[in-house]
Amino acid sequence: MKKLIFPILVILLMTAGCMPVVPAPANQLPIAYMDSVSPTKVSPGGKIAFEGHGTDPDGTVVAYRWRSSIDGELSTSASFDTTSLSEGTHTIYFKVQDSSGDWSREIYCHITVLPGGPVAPVIDSFDASPGVIAEGESLTLSWDVSGAVAVSIAPGIGNVALAGTRVVSPTKTTSYTLTATNEVGSVMSTIQVVVTPVPLHTVELFSVAAEDGHVKKNGETGPDPNVGDTPSNVAMQAFLSFDISMIPTGATIKSASLDLTTGDIFGSPFTRLGWMQVFSDQYGSLDSDDFVIAPGYGAIDTTRVRPTQPISCARLVSAIQTQVDDLSSRFQVRVQFERYSFNNREADYLALGAGKPRLVIEYED
């Protein structure tokens, strides 16, 4: 009979609505984190940036609160800036609230606002983006200064506003210096921008022997690029052809050198015929009309003695660039002496050698 007492008691309690209630688990408090408070020491009116966040193991963070031991409530945002803190050493407190309405434990740090009166300007930031560029590219300088009456950036920029940006295109690695000045003095900040050179392509070309040759004043042509005069005092002009078809459309010629030092010399052409001159002359295929009777003007190069080193000059680069821009597959030159001939019974000429003259070109895409 006693065994029936407990079940009957349970039934009576359920009927009366007196079953025990299991309590809900306690809410876990959120946790606050100060990510950044910068700077921690500032002149009056200087800008201080605050950034924080929070986590909650059993809910979400829904509110934030920053306060100062001196100035009281500062902000209810996760991050903010201020320039209005009072003079003195502040204890900055930060806490977060979860979706259950509970606040985290406050965390804190210290910042100092220096005493009032004239102070040096403060460079809050001075940056370059990007810090490394290729030759020919641009970058952006940005800056933010407080407490200055004048701000300048060197080299090449000059006076600027207290805050701003400027797009620059340095041609080489450059250090930019920002100088901020007021009645107290000047402060400076320097950043370096690295400029990497664009890779150059180099081609080495020998003249096309089948297109080289000479033309005499009497209209005769020959396969050897000889310049000077014959034993019978007939003037000769040499012609050289180089295949530049491998240089891509749109390329920029950066340097070039033309080597005419390999030829053999006969007689005394430089003594008897004067200056040797090299001209850009896109003659195509040689014929009798290619001999130039008029005096030569606009030469790429002139020399009073036999060449001992390659010709390398801006006029040569420009002449090759013109052919590349015109989508030509050839760069050709004419070589002649200042005087056509000398009254002498022996040959005076320089034999450049078909296929031997060399042209080296550097270019960028």
Image (cartoon, rainbow, N blue to C red):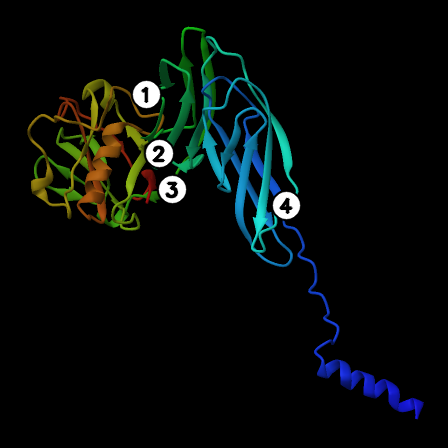
- Examine the rendered structure and indicate whether residue 7 appears above or below residue 315: below
User: What amino acid type should be assigned to the residue bearing mark 1?
Assistant: Val
For mark 2, give the secondary structure.
loop
Q: Specify which label sits upstream in the sequence, 1 or 4.
A: 4
Residue 18, quarter of the rendered image: bottom right
At 77% across and 84% down in the image, what residue appears? 12
- Find out whether the residues at labels 1 and 3 contact each other: C-beta distance under 8 Å: no
The residue where tag 3 is placed is 202
Mark 1 packing: few (<14 Cα in 10 Å), some, or many (20+)?
some
Which numbered mark, 1 or 4, is in the foreground of this view? Answer: 4
Depth order, front residue of 26/150: 26
Q: The N terminus lies in which quarter of the figure?
A: bottom right
The residue where tag 2 is placed is 262
Mark 2 packing: few (<14 Cα in 10 Å), some, or many (20+)?
some
The residue where tag 4 is placed is 104
Q: How far apart in space, not on screen, are marks 2 and 3 (Cα)?
A: 21 Å
For mark 1, give the secondary structure.
strand
At 25% across and 19% down in the image, what residue appears? 304
Depth order, front residue of 100/125: 100
Q: Specify which label sits upstream in the sequence, 3 or 4.
A: 4
Which numbered mark, 4 or 2, is in the foreground of this view? Answer: 4
User: What amino acid type should be assigned to the residue bearing mark 2?
Assistant: Thr
- Examine the rendered structure and indicate whether residue 173 appears above or below residue 35: above
User: What amino acid type should be assigned to the residue bearing mark 4?
Assistant: Ser
Q: Position of residue 301 (x, y in %)?
A: 23, 26
Which numbered mark, 1 or 3, is in the foreground of this view? Answer: 1
Task: Give residue 160's mark.
Answer: 1
